[in-house]
Amino acid sequence: MNMVVLFLQRAIVQGTPLLYGSMGETLTEKSGNLNLGIPGIMYTGGISGVIGAFLYERTLGVGEMPNAFLAIFLPLICALIGSALMSLLYCFLTITLRANQNVTGLAITTFGVGVGNFFGGYLAHFSTDGSTGVSITKVSDVFSTPLPFADNLGWFGTLFFSYGFLVYVGIILAVLMALMLRRTRIGLHLRAVGENPATADAAGISVSAYKYGATVIGGMIAGLGGLYYVVDYMGVWSNDGFGDRGWLAIAIVIFTLWKPDLGILGSFLFGGLYIIYLFIPDLSRSSQELFKMLPYLVTIAVLIFTSVRNKRDSQPPASLGLSYFREER
Amino acid sequence: MNNSIAIELKGVTKTFGSVIANKNVNLDVRRGEILAILGENGSGKTTLMNMISGIYYPDEGEILINGESVVIRSPRDAFKYKIGMIHQHFKLVDVFTAAENIVLGLDGAFNKKRAAAEVLEISSRYGFEIDPNKKIHEMAVSEKQTVEIIKVLYRGADILILDEPTAVLTPQETQKLFAVLRKMRDDGKSIIIITHKLHEVLSISDRVAILRKGEHIDTVVTKETDENQLTEMMVGKKVELNIERDEPKNPTDRLVVMGLDCMSRDGIKILDDVSFVARSGEILGIAGIAGSGQRELLEAIAGLQHIEHGAISYINPENGEEVDLRDKTPLEIRDLGVRLSFVPEDRLGMGLVGNMDIIDNMMLRSYSAGHSFFLDRLPSTALAEDVIDRLEVVTPDAHTPVRRLSGGNVQKVLVGREIASAPTVLMAAYPVRGLDINSSYTIYNLLNEQKKNGVAVIFVGEDLDVLLELCDRILVIGSGRVTGIVDGRTATKEEIGILMTKTEGAE
């Protein structure tokens, strides 16, 4: 029992960066932009948050407790700005200059990882204990403060109330985004832009504005995934520590058929698969590696399944990956 | 009903790079009037209308609405002046419902139920039939068009522009559409209709504006003109509008199709028990609503489509030998002289490679000839020059990428190449789609020439008038079944129209 609760709890923690990443990418793809720069943007979101947290911690004296508001606000705003700038770069290249989206996305990922490692390496110089990581323990403790009644509710509290606030924000955002896409006029217009920009344009919708808006906001949401991972979960930045979570987030978008509400379940499932090898007793070193393959096997299976099942309503946005130019002849 | 001017264009000019699309166009449309705009391909009809509806912005000149000069910079501006355009290629989102498409782009709260109710209200006023909650991808072409029209009416448009609305409709559907348009005209709306088809211009419009090479030639009152005068103004010279049709010379069976069944890629039966014979020296027309299985039929013959049941035998004209095409690869079928010149909706989709020049496209048929390791471009170059010459392809030279040619010229290159290979069976699907009168007649003449040479020609067309003038026999296909085979000399348009919509097979 205890093991199961612990596994589920870890799955949710592992799934949260994926939830933010996939949510951001879903919003972006709904506008017809296939942003393969998401791994880089999440990475940038992470390092920007770390920079904010690190600078704030430097202002604290030894043993001084951080101010909860500043400890959350500064890293949060830094992560949002960092990922927004990366997304803006992607938008400028693909929407304004109409560059190829795949190439641009991959370049942004490479660039984002480079930016992260550069600042990560730079900040590590200041570490007092001579380690190569950037430790931000005090801010991390604020971020990962569980809800007040988590401790005295037993397994129920562990499973539902033991997380930092970003987990709850992520779930609420996903539900809101699903409602927005399905029920509101903005959602209708955004879907129209991603499906058929020429139609949206002829209907008087500003295609560029929607594409910029969705991609930048989507990137900022994805950036929060990076922030959660390093600041809440890890509490320390180490270069290349983010793994391939960004790519998994993109796989989840396909897995959940571009539906943010399904994305909540999909992300937690993938989060669980990511760490299941730790919860199966007596695994040899080599079978551990086999279990680590699970998220990728599921992704491949999903891709096969969705390609074979040719249902019209579960297809990607029709203009995904294409740039739009009104006067094209 | 007053006859005041609703919209007026003064000296409108638009250029794309060095190409002049419209030059100093002066035009007016009155209230309660249907104005037809007539012109060949590339005469700038669509560009002109796109400027009124805010897709393009004119380089020079002004647009006046109700006598006031206005600036239309975007489709949103166009709505503001109550202008609505129904594009030739529908601007609809496939995965949305009719109602969602209709309210797209409007402000205010989004309420599916209320939108659906309002749509129904408009449809009943003008006599449309529509299900507001049906998704677009489940709709037939005429339904999609209805959605487009309701969309502009929903926005309260007073000036409606229709770009080739009848291209995709059966004769019956066209009549229905025209009835609706007349109703709107009597309602005081101004309607601009772009079309290639002269008889439609004469039957629906009050006045006709003729464009030629981007310039406005004249606007005439429909009642005071006729087909010959209109054609002359449009082309700039007298054109013989009759397609010659010789009696087939000793026709013999060339291709015998028996009980053909095919599945589409989605696993739906797209051809059902199709049987017919194509004879040498004869043009067999195929009529049917778009997507009724014409494409699959031709592809099955060419070996590109998997055949579930049935047989296709080819009778070799040299030795009378009968060959079953089912066992042959597309390459072997081609070598027998069965040629497919398929012009799908997107002209470059099949048959030509847009980024390659004319010479290399010629080579797509002959690349395997010769024994040298290197390519021999000389024969292809000669062929390219010959096609350009004979078919009057407008191109800077043979090295121009095909993508940069206009639609009509692309089609000439494709048809020219297939004919050059001296086929015994020539299949042409929509070879004149989107072509102007002059180019169309060039293609008809080419097909007739092939017929005289004893080729069995199969011609899939959309314009029934042309089918009736050109073809010796017409096979009508409806929902993948042969609903009738009629004599091209005696059949009427109505007869074919009824066969097209019939769902049961011929007796």
Image (tube, rainbow, N blue to C red):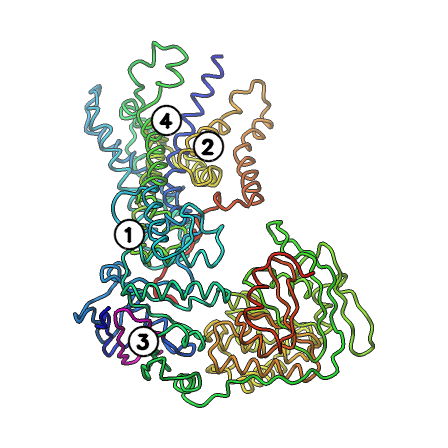
Q: Quadrant of residue B492?
A: bottom right
A114 or B406, nearer to the observer? B406
Residue labelled with disc 4: A233
Mark 2, secondary structure of its residue: helix
Nearer the observer, B24 or A323: B24
In this rendering, the label closer to the viewer, 2 or 4 = 2
Tell me whether marks 4 and 3 sit on the same chain.
Answer: no
- Magenta span: B16-36
Q: Earlier in the sequence, mark 2 or mark 1?
A: 1
Tell me the subunit letter for badge 4. Answer: A
Query: At x 22% / y 76%, what residue is drawn?
Result: B61
- Above or below, comparing residue B90 to residue B277 in the picture: above
Q: Residues within 10 Å of mark 1 (few under 14, many from 20)?
A: few
- Crowd tier of the residue under label 4, counting other residues whose Cα lies within 10 Å: few below 14, some 14–19, many 20 or above: some
Q: CA distance from mark 4 to mark 1?
A: 35 Å
Do the residues at pointers 4 and 1 share their chain? yes
Name which residue type carries label 4: Tyr
Q: Chain of mark 2?
A: A
**Residue A208 at x, y percent in the picture:** 31, 54
What's the magenta bit mostly, secondary-structure-wise?
A: strand
The picture quadrant where one finds residue B505 is bottom right
Reading the image, the residue beneath label 2 is A266
The residue carrying mark 3 is B15
Task: Single out the mark in the foreground, 4 or 1.
Answer: 1
The image position of residue A238, as x and y in percent, is: 38, 33
Q: Is residue A23 magenta?
A: no
| Direction left: furthest residue | B68
A98 horizontally vs A62: left or right: right
SS at badge 3: strand
For the residues labelled 4 and 3, the Cα–Cα distance comes to 59 Å
